[in-house]
Image: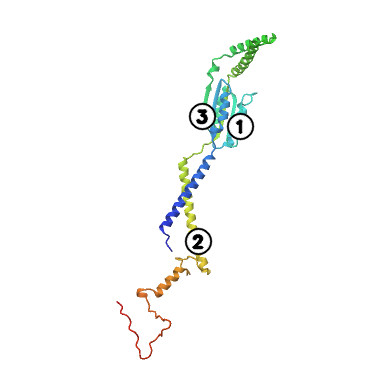
Amino acid sequence: MARIPRSRVRGIAIFVVFVALAWAALTTERHTDATINFNQIMREPDVRWRDTGSVNKARIRLRSGNITQALSQGLSLVNEYGVAGQQPVMRSTQSNYGVYIFRVWQSQLGDLQEKLGQLGTIEEFKETVDTALVVRKLSTEEAILASKQAELASLSSTPSNYGDISAHRNRLYEDIRRLENTVDILRQSDTTLLYLQLLPVASKTTSYINRLAIRFLIALAAMFVAIIILYYGTRLLIYLLTLMGVKGLPTSGLGGSTYGYGNYANRYYNRYGYGSGKRKVKRIYKGQPTTPPPGEQSPPEPDKK
């Protein structure tokens, strides 16, 4: 079999390495972009839970290997332990995660946490208390609210178009609205605003460099095998075509007869070569007799030094 020059092998190897590296970089980047970013998804529920007023707040993040079953049973627990008559602040069930913000009775929070633990692993459990609301008493806030409402009623019964009275009436409206919200929250001090996250088990992610190296080795091995198959497949095809009588194909080293110029030159020099393989050739010149006339002797041959 004919040997391939080293320069050609080196060039092919460099080309294969660069192609494998480019393919690995492109596919690894697309795989990274395709991953689910739960931190981005949970931004809106985080803001909703933070802005909703409550004396007691709690957050539970649960991860389950069987997320479909966890979502089904988790939704049942939300409906079972949610405070009756109150709509959940947020309830979102997707194919691979769920988010629920609802109120539960403070006395039932421990029981709910235990049942959630049976669905998977509780990754985070956190309870917080709004210190700005804890120091306030419900009776005091109700008295202040009643006083503001009485003052607003007296101003409404006295017709007046002065600007300062109208501005004072608007301030009373804002104060009453804020006090009503505070009173409602204090009346629910025995409940907890629960923020429940049901997520799938986090897969073990490798670094970008490791994934790039793995894909590079896979691409390198695949291209190496493809080149070997292509090389020997091409030579086998040429050999078969030569056996079928197709001439002019570069089949040197395959054992078949060839018809190239190089092989013709080799046969010529082997037959009429120099040195030990040289054979004497009688040259005949035009216009000269091949043999000397009768009575004449052949000219002497020049001395070979």
Instruction: Specify the farthest residue to the left.
Output: 305
Q: Residue at x 50, y 63 (%)?
A: 236
Can you say which quadrant of the picture contains the C terminus? Answer: bottom left
Measure the alpha-carbon separation of dots 2 and 1: 60 Å
Q: Which residue is mark 1?
A: 92
Q: Which mark is residue 293?
A: none
Question: Quick check: 51 above or below 158?
Answer: below
Counting residues from the start of the chain, the first of labels 2 and 3 encountered is: 3
Residue 26 position in % (x across, y down): 51, 45
Q: Which of the two discs, 2 and 1, sits closer to the camera?
A: 2
Look at label 2 and name its amino acid.
Thr
Q: Residue at x 60, y 11 (%)?
A: 144
At label 3, counting other C-alpha atoms closer than 10 Å, the crowd grade (few under 14, some 14-19, many 20 or more) is few
In the image, is 283 to the left or to the right of 245? left
Q: Which residue is mark 3?
A: 124
Look at label 3 and name its amino acid.
Glu
Look at label 1 and name its amino acid.
Ser
Measure the alpha-carbon separation of dots 2 and 3: 62 Å
Question: Quick check: 56 above or below 216?
Answer: above
